[in-house]
Structures are given as C-alpha cells and as structure tokens.
Image: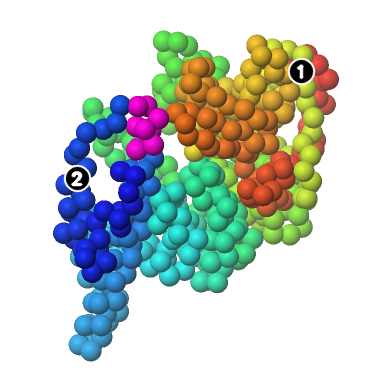
Amino acid sequence: MNDTLQDVTETPSGALDASAVRAFHDRLDGDVAVDTDDLLAEIRACEELKNALTARQARVAVAVHEDQLARDVPRGISKADTAREVGAKVAVARRCAPHLGSRLLGLAHAVTEEMPHTRDALAAGVISEWDATALCRETACLSREDRAAVDAAVADQLGTVSHRQLESSARGHAYRLDPEAVAARRARAESERRVTLRPAPDCMTRLTAFLPVKDGVACFAALSAYANAHATPEHPRGQVMADALVERVTGRAAADDPDVEVNLMMSLDSLTGDAPAYVPDYGPIPADLAREWVGDPEQKIKVRRLFTFPGSGDLVGMESRARCYTGLLAKFIKLRDQTCRTPFCSAPIRHIDHITPYAEGGPTTERNGQGLCERCNYGREHPDHEVTGDATETTTVIGGLVATSHPPSQPGMPPPTRSHVERTLIDVTWTYYTVPPDDDQPD
C-alpha cells in the first residue's frame, strides 16, 4: 500500500489502462498490518489514493469529452448535445444519475483546466472530490481569471483545513474579486427560497428550508436558545429543537422567546467598501448585505455588530481566574473559532476547554482556550491523544500522525497560510460589553 498507483498499475508502455487498474484492485484483499501506527499509515495512504483516483477520473472524463467532440463536430452535432451525451456516459461509468454525470463532467473541466492548485492537491490526494466540488461551486460565477485567482489564494489551505473552512475561504475570496457577480448570484438564490421534504430511513423525513442567510441563522438561533433552556438528559438538544420546530410551525405552541439575535462580524471596510462580513454558524457574506442588515430599522431580528480592524494581529485580551470558561470569555472564543478546532472537524462548538489542561497548569485565558465539539473534547482525554499550542495554532498528534489547526480568518484579514499563521487572529472591539477583569463574568 505504500507504493503509488502508478508504480503498481502501469502497463509495459508506461500508460494506465482499465485492466491495469483492475489488477491493482484485485491486490487490495490482502492481509493487513498488526502495528497500530502502520495501520493508520495505511488508512492515510488509502485515503490519498482514493482522492488521487478522482483526479485521474477527472482527466479521463475530459479526454472522453474531447474525443466525442472530435467525432461530433464534423457531424454537425451541437456542443451542448455532445456535453449532455458525455455526461450520460460518465454517469453510466460511475453508476450515478445522468444529471450528476453532467455535473461531474463540469467539475472535471473546471479542476483540470482552470484550477491548477486544486488539481494538484486532488492528484496528490490531500483533498477530496467533495472539497474540489465546493471550490468549483463557490467560484462558478467568476471569470476564468478570477477563478484561477481564488484557486491560488486558497492554495496554502488545501489539505490543511476542514471542508467548511476551505469553502468559507473560497466564498470570501470570490466576493472580494467580483462583488457584483456574487450579489447577482445571491439575488437569484433568494428568489429560489423553498421548503422540501425527503424520505429518510426508519420512517423519518428530512424537512429542509432553503432560506436567505439572516432568516436561516435566526431560525436556528431561536431553536437553539429554546433547546438550551429546556433540554434534559432524557430529552437532549436535538430532540427539543425538532419538537419546538414542529410545535411552532404547526401552531401547537407559540414562541416564548421571540428576541432572536444574529451576530455580525464586520470590519470598517465592510461599511464603506467591499470587504466581506462574517456570520458565525454560516460564513462570509457580501458587504452590501451586511450594510442592508445594519441599515434596516424595521427588521425584527436583532443584529449584534462586532467590528474588526483590518491588518491587526492582536486579539482583545480576556482572562479569568476561574477553572471553567463561562460568560463573555466563552462567547468570545466561540465567535473566534466558529467551529470545532480539531483538525478537519467542522462540527458546531459545544465545549470551551483548555489547550494546556488546567490540571497541568494551563491558565483559563483566551490564548489557552479553544472551542470543541463534544466528541473531540472527550476524545482528547485519551493518553494517546496529544494537543499542544495556543489560540493561534494548535498541533494534534495521534497514532503517529500530526495535524495543525488555527482559527479561520476574520473580516478584514487574509486567510492564514503556513508562513503567516501569526496573523490569523483579529482585534475585536466589543461595542456592547464591558468585560470584567476576573471570573465574575455574566452568562
């Protein structure tokens, strides 16, 4: 498994073909190692190989399209009809629906022809086809040149951040490059708002609402606030939120907490220029939309503005002598980290905990705090799971594998890079709070 795909499957002529790939496939049903580190290394190698194969599929799909064009153009067949036919062929080859085959063909062209950094990362196996799809989707409204610029801007994040962070970063760069195209795309999307229902296993359903960001975030915030106040061990948050949604939509119960608050993090440039703002639990939004929210005196949803300063690398200091993170300090860290800080995890933050444990002398400070989901916070208690660092960058060592994590860039700041990690944090002015200097912090 340590050999590359080319090493073990190339034909005598040096080229890959279907029989060579299948021959390699037949060799996968062998014995596995017994050492844990070797097993984890093989899992990593398999994942990288799987991703690299999708890059190969993309190249092959483009070659199929080019071959079909060469035969169809002399026959007077339109390029649109050719693309539809090739999409159908790709769908059959990948055992998926025809409309998905056409989307995969479009993805193949975008990755192989317009996004070289994404193509190389996919071929190296460090990102997945799903990551590449998100990058292409977030840049679909841009020109070829601007799409390439976004591809270059996120190059240092490929394979080093979670899917959600990568997607959010690409969205922010796309807006900076062409605000008008993104605004037009947003207007079209808002006109397509809808509610859909799909079946789910075990006699369940998936009720999905496609809403403008402020409305969606507000709905989720209202249900979350209700669940936080009413959840019990017998009825956890998810159940309470689902029950509250049904009761309020059907009219069986009225909302008893109508004051909904949406946090809006924005730099001063968002008020006067095109710098994107940021909504926790969602991601970057265009500056014109942020100004629309701020300037609407009749909106029923309370928007809390948190201003950031472009170019600053210092974070407002908040400390507590308490053992636990509570009150404003906990809220601050949650806004800073946005999602779980474990590498590649994008789960919502449920716990605020110490990077260096309190029992080992770690202080309850902003620099030593991180937001984690429940699973990751409990998982790091295992003696084989080591986390070091501070708020700027943490390093996780598990099973001989090493990965780093840092907070996503805030409004007014460029995304973090390997050579510039110290500038990933931003100075935030809290215009609504006076922060207590000790552990007497309000919840």
Query: Where is residue 25 drawn, in percent x and y?
Result: 20, 48
Find residue 31 and report its image quarter: top left
Magenta part mainly helix, strand or loop?
helix
Quadrant (top left, top right, bottom left, bottom right) of the N terminus: top left
Q: Which residues are magenta?
A: 35-43
Q: Nearest the camera: 184 or 428?
A: 428
Please tell me whether residue 341 is drawn above or below residue 96 in the rendered image. Answer: above
Nearest to viewer (mark 2 / mark 1): 2
Left-right relation of 333 to 147: right
Q: Residues within 10 Å of mark 2 (few under 14, many from 20)?
A: few
Instruction: Identify the residue at image location x=63%, y=49%.
Output: 417
Please tell me whether residue 331 is drawn above or below residue 273 in the rendered image. Answer: above
Q: Is residue 171 visible?
A: no
Q: Nearest the camera: 251 or 367?
A: 367
Q: Amino acid at mark 1?
A: Ser
Quadrant (top left, top right, bottom left, bottom right) of the C terminus: top right
Instruction: Identify the residue at image location x=38%, y=62%.
Output: 107
Q: Amino acid at mark 2?
A: Arg
Q: What number is the disc on residue 27?
A: 2
Query: Where is residue 82 drawn, in percent x and y?
Result: 25, 75
Query: Where is residue 423 drawn, in percent x and y?
Result: 72, 45
Q: What number is the disc on residue 320?
A: 1
Point out the tag, 2 or 1, that comes first from the N-terminus: 2
Query: Per the image, is 40 magenta?
Result: yes
In three-dimensional space, the C-alpha distance between marks 2 and 1, rounded to whole angstroms, equals 57 Å
